[in-house]
Amino acid sequence: FNINMNTYSFPLVRSSRHKQSPCYASFVQLLKPGSRIMHALQIHQPEPRNLHRALTIRDFQILKFLWEMKFADGLTLHYGFFQTHKDNSQRTSTKYAINRLTKLKALGCVDREAVLGYPTKLFRLTKFGASLLQSNCPEIEVNYDRQPIDFHTLLHDLKVSRVRVALEHLKRASNWQSERVLKQKSTIVYGLSKQYMPDGVYNSRDGELVAFELEIARKSLARYKDKIQKYVQVIRANSSSSLGFKRVLFVCEHDPIFELLSEQTQIFPEFF
């Protein structure tokens, strides 16, 4: 399974018209089909109770993914949710993903946000989509606090999403908890303050809790040493408990970072 980290192009999708409002039926005899007046009578938001019937389990999984990861490009959503047919054969085109995402956008569940300096618009969960997700998944707390996308962390966040999709596809990760979800829980999670919060936490194939870190730009040696020592301290403190993560997975985009982290963690092979 391969995700090209340098591929970000995704065709712009256009929103189709929303469902007609109840008042439409009263005037249908008087208005010519396709007229501007008919379009003006159409509503901008479907009724939630009717929309639940139109959404699939996969649609709600997409909404949950967008809430957890804050945003995603179309290619990541294709790989994560549309890559295979029902018979498990591989889709060779993103057309099906485009059509379904266009439908979700037309229903008001998602929208697309442009980021200055980035070539394509990114999919984001709308407030309406968040309310649908909350009503369908009462076990999670969907706090809708949409902030502008930070261009400085954009590439890092997109690549975290892609690595997550790859690990889940390979059955190496499940029950992913994103940085956003972790920070929402409390000031300290699994013994780590927000200063040391990982990019994600997930369950491995064996059910073991693993902290995830993606490194795409080199940081200072002192900063790496500090983070590694903190992880070692927390893991040792949780050694006799079933709670807390037991290992840390570092994924590095560049060889020099990988070599540096390998050197710093080689004395803790059971943890990294």
Image: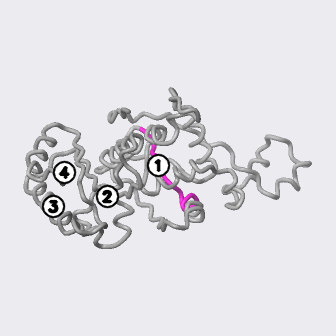
Distance in Å between CA atoms under marks 2 and 1? 33 Å
The residue shown at (28%, 53%) is: 212
Contact, CB < 8 Å: mark 2 with mark 3? no
Left or right: where does residue 193 sit relative to residue 229? right
- The x, y position of residue 33, in whole percent, is 83, 41
**Label 4 or label 3, whichever comes before in sequence order:** 3
Distance in Å between CA atoms under marks 1 and 3? 39 Å
Left or right: where does residue 29 sit relative to residue 80? right
**Residue 135 to residue 206: above or below:** below
According to the picture, the residue beneath numbered tag 4 turns out to be 272
According to the picture, the residue beneath numbered tag 1 turns out to be 113
The answer to which of 204 and 68 lies nearer the viewer is 204
Contact, CB < 8 Å: mark 1 with mark 4? no
Crowding near the residue tagged with mark 3, few <14, some 14–19, many ≥20 C-alpha atoms within 10 Å: some
Q: Amino acid at mark 2?
A: Leu
According to the picture, the residue beneath numbered tag 3 turns out to be 232
